[in-house]
Amino acid sequence: VNASAQGPERSLTRKLGQLFVERWRRVSPDTIVVDRNLAAAPPPFVTEDWIAAAFTLPERRTSAMRDALVPSDHLISEVRAADVIVIGAPMYNYGMPAVLKAWFDQLARIGETFTFDLARGDWPIQPILGGKTLVVLSARGEFGFEKNGPRERMNALDPGIAACAHYLGVAPGDHHLVTIEFQEFKDARHAASRAAAEEQVGTLAESLSRRLIAQARAAA
Ligand SMILES: Cc1cc2nc3c(=O)[nH]c(=O)nc-3n(C[C@H](O)[C@H](O)[C@H](O)COP(=O)(O)O)c2cc1C
């Protein structure tokens, strides 16, 4: 899932995504990869009609309501089919690119990706999907957005994705983050950050791929 507005020649997050797939395929060459390019085909924003459709029981929906949910149905089916979801998520104005927020908004659907029941008390939302692994490949121009970093309080990106990860069926322990920093400084710190991220992405792709193969063997 690529959210950068830039193409593969310039985008650091797209390059990390390509590297992830390349290293994954070294271990598991037959893996099916679905490329969801959010910049090329931005998901629609949530509208009043969309909300009305989503909160109407499927059997009561009009054909206009069903039409309003087609993009959401399609994006949810991609996530449902995935074992691993890799998101290329640049930091834009301290948060998610709008296309990525729109993607999450289309995915969070009552009866499809979560249920809501006040009988559960203060935590009425329960995810429907489960067992997926999330890899977030991020890049940012500045630095220090990590826990206890100098810009931690400005980071609306990583916590925003983490908060929505349950809609994807991802438990907190199955959420991995690799980040390139200092892009706007274009200095040695950026080069070091990029090299470290590439190293991490390669290792992560191979280890997750091996783990998935082992799980599949154990289940067979
Ligand atoms: C519209 C826009 C907004 C940005 N906002 C921020 C920001 O708030 N903080 C930051 O550290 N970098 C910011 N940057 C820098 C990007 O995060 C950085 O260039 C990153 O490499 C972009 O990802 P990409 O290389 O995959 O396109 C912004 C860049 C753009 C184009």
Image: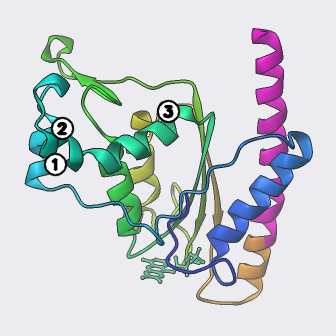
CB within 8 Å, label 2 to label 1 = yes
Q: Position of residue 163 (x, y in %)?
A: 38, 43
Q: CA distance from mark 1 to mark 3?
A: 21 Å
Name the foreground residue: 111 vs 23.
Answer: 111
- Lateral position of residue 105 relative to residue 83, left or right: left
N-terminal of the pair, mark 3 or mark 2, is 2
- Give neighbour class at mark 1: few <14, some 14-19, many 20+ (Cα, 10 Å): many
At x 41%, y 44%, the residue is: 74
The amino acid type of the residue labelled 3 equals Arg
* Quarter occupied by the N terminus: bottom right
Q: Label 2: which residue?
A: 54
- Inspect the magenta stretch and tell me whether residue 215 lies in it: yes
As helix, strand or loop, the secondary structure at mark 2 comes to: helix
At x 43%, y 67%, the residue is: 41
- Give neighbour class at mark 3: few <14, some 14-19, many 20+ (Cα, 10 Å): some
- Inspect the magenta stretch and tell me whether residue 34 lies in it: no
At x 39%, y 23%, the residue is: 128
Magenta span: predominant SS is helix
Q: CA distance from mark 3 to mark 2?
A: 18 Å
Count the marks: how many? 3
Q: Label 3: which residue?
A: 80
The magenta stretch spans which residues?
195-220
Residue 171: tell me if it is visible.
no
Q: Label 1: which residue?
A: 50
Q: CA distance from mark 2 to mark 1?
A: 6 Å
Q: Quadrant of residue 168?
A: top left
- In this view, 174 is above or below 89: above
**Please, which residue is most extreme toward the right here?**
26
The amino acid type of the residue labelled 2 equals Ala
Q: Position of residue 6 (x, y in %)?
A: 55, 81
